[in-house]
Amino acid sequence: MGYKVAVVGATGAVGREMLTTLAERNFPADEIIALASARSAGGQVSYGEKDVLTIHDLAKHDFSTTDIALFSAGGDVAKEYAPKAGKAGCVVIDNSSAFRMDPDVPLVVPEVNGDAVGKYGKKNIIANPNCSTAQLVMALKPLHDTFGVKRVVVSTYQSVSGAGKDGMDELFNQTRAVYVNDPIEKTQFTKQIAFNVIPHIDVFMDDGFTKEEWKMRVETCKILDPDIEVVAQCVRVPVFVGHAEAVFIETKKPIDEQGATDVLRNFPGVIVIDHRADEGYVTPQESAGEDAVYVSRIRRDPTVKNGLVFWCVSDNLRKGAALNAVQIAETLIERFLKKAA
């Protein structure tokens, strides 16, 4: 017997990617339910290459009939419906930031801390990390296990799909407007994103950092090690899909380029493509549609005793969101959920 799985926020960019990923990975589901707001109910979304699902009203769904719910509908929706679903016996895997720092909710990247999935029982909620955090900890985990990461300095180059479909539409419309000399309209971003970069993601906090930068710090510590020091600068760039990160780390043990490359290559979900030549690295455009986290440009940092610099890219809609959520669900049913598949 398979599982009954709901995708909440099925009409959004990540929700659609969740449906695609469930189909691609042949998730053991007897039924997939697409849920969204009342205004979307009655519409349709694709599931796999051939199937089409009718969208149902989230507010009317009985979660006691559902085993697992993948949420990608924003923090406000998650705060309202995820606890209700959990109390009804459905295990929620939430992509928003609503529960990430809740001590009773595990924050999981399966390759990094898959055992934490087993702690879902207190609230029946498992949190998916921020998309930039997910790819960062994938690269840090093997380095931390081998060399002991003390400090991380990371600058992100985050695509507009991180702001959802509306963010992608704004980049498209502004780019077109530039070429045809139309007025530039902005609603999703604080400044023009076409042909520009914006050093501002999420709201500003009292210390001058943005909440996105705070998320990367606290989430990395929760997933990987509370003793790691992390500082981030998060930047929105005019790319549709794929986040990139320039990462500078300092380790407790001596680290060298070959040793770092070896442990990264042996870690599941990470692919090293690093040739010191033209095109010998991976860019966000090449990562789009791919499941892996790609690491390139590995070199020693000569400014600290045990330092390393590398470039890291990944499809933020997949490993940064949909794929990671589905992998959490796979880990849940393989190791922890008491139901015969």
Image (cartoon, rainbow, N blue to C red):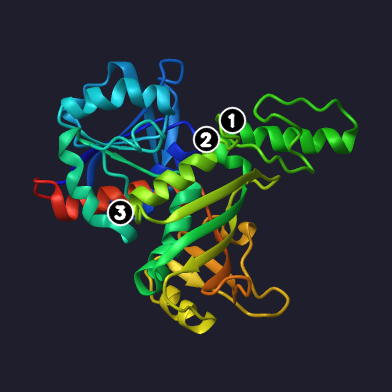
Determine crowd level at label 1: few under 14, some 14-19, many 20+ residues with C-alpha closer than 10 A.
Answer: some
The image position of residue 178, as x and y in percent, is 85, 36
Label located before the other in sequence (3 or 1): 3
Location of mark 1 (residue): 204
Q: Residue at x 51, y 74 (%)?
A: 306
Label located before the other in sequence (2 or 3): 3
Location of mark 2 (residue): 211
Location of mark 3 (residue): 26
CB atoms at circles 2 and 3 under 8 Å apart? no
Q: Nearer the viewer, mark 2 or mark 3?
A: 2
Q: Residue at x 60, y 76 (%)?
A: 299
The image position of residue 327, as x and y in percent, is 32, 53
Taking the image as drawn, is residue 22 in sight? Answer: no
Between the C-alphas of marks 3 and 1, the distance is: 41 Å
**Is 25 in front, or is 300?**
300
Instruction: Label 1: state its secondary structure.
Output: loop
**Is 281 in front, or is 67?**
281
Indicate the amino acid at tag 1: Phe
**Is 67 in front, or is 195?**
195
Q: Residue at x 52, y 65 (%)?
A: 249
CB atoms at circles 2 and 1 under 8 Å apart? yes
